[in-house]
Amino acid sequence: MLIPEDGRLTIAHEHFASARLRNFLCASIRPFAACACAPTLVVATPTAQLHELGAVIVAAAAANRGWRAVYLGPSLPAVEICGAIQQNRAHAVALSLVYPDNDPGLPGELRTIRRCLPKDFPVLVGGRAAAAYAETLREIGAHLSNNVTDFCRKLDEVRESNCRETATAP
C-alpha cells in the first residue's frame, strides 16, 4: 500500500483499513457464539446507512458477552430487519446510525421497525448520527447508547430481564 510522500492517509487507505477491520470483527463473532439457548441480537444499519463498522463492533461485543449475534449488514429496509427479528426469534435489535445524520426517510424507517415489534421489545441504537434522530428514538422508545460500554450494560439488562421473565413464566 502506497502512502503519499507527505504522510497523509487517503480515503482509499481508510476504506482499506475499515474493510480489514470489518473482516476481522466478523470472523470474531463466530468463535464466541454461545449455545443455542443464548439470547439473540439482530444487528444492522437501516436503509441508506452505509457505514457498518459500528454495527460490526456491537455484534462482536454482543457475541463476546454470550449473545447469538445475527449481523445483517448495512442499508437494510425496516421490513427486512423486522423479518429477521421474527425469523430468528430475537430478544433485541441493535441499529447503527453513522451517516447521513439528516436523512428525511430514516425516521419513517425507525417507526416501521417499532410498529412491527412488541411494545416492550428492546431497540438499541448508537453511532455518530444517532443523536440527530433523538426525537424519533424517544418516540419509538429506543435506547440510545453513546458508546460500547453503555451498549454492553444495556445488553446485560435485557438479558437479565429475559431471565426473570423466563423464570416466572408458567
Image: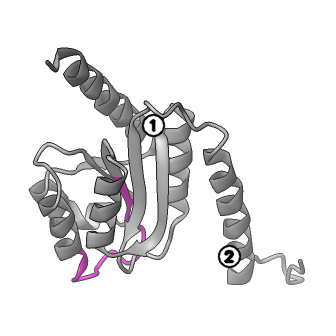
Residue 77: name its quadrant.
bottom left
**Which residues are drawn in magenta?**
94-106
Left or right placement of residue 98 versus residue 11 in this view: left
Amino acid at circle 2: His
From where the camera sits, is residue 10 visible? no
Q: Is residue 136 above or below residue 40?
A: below
Q: Is residue 76 above or below residue 81?
A: below
Name the foreground residue: 17 vs 170: 170
Q: Which residue is mark 2?
A: 15
Secondary structure, mark 1, is: helix
Q: Is residue 111 above or below residue 161?
A: below
Magenta-colored stretch includes residue 97: yes
Residue visible at 25% across and 75% down in the picture: 106
Residue 86: name its quadrant.
bottom left
Name the foreground residue: 84 vs 150: 84
Tell me where residue 44 appears, x and y as whole percent: 42, 62
Tell me where residue 88 appears, x and y as whole percent: 37, 51
Amino acid at circle 1: Thr
Residue visible at 39% across and 35% down in the picture: 39
Residue visible at 69% across and 52% down in the picture: 27
Q: Which residue is mark 1?
A: 149
Q: Main secondary structure of the magenta part?
A: loop
Secondary structure, mark 2, is: helix
From where the camera sits, is residue 6 visible? yes
Q: Is residue 130 above or below residue 79?
A: above
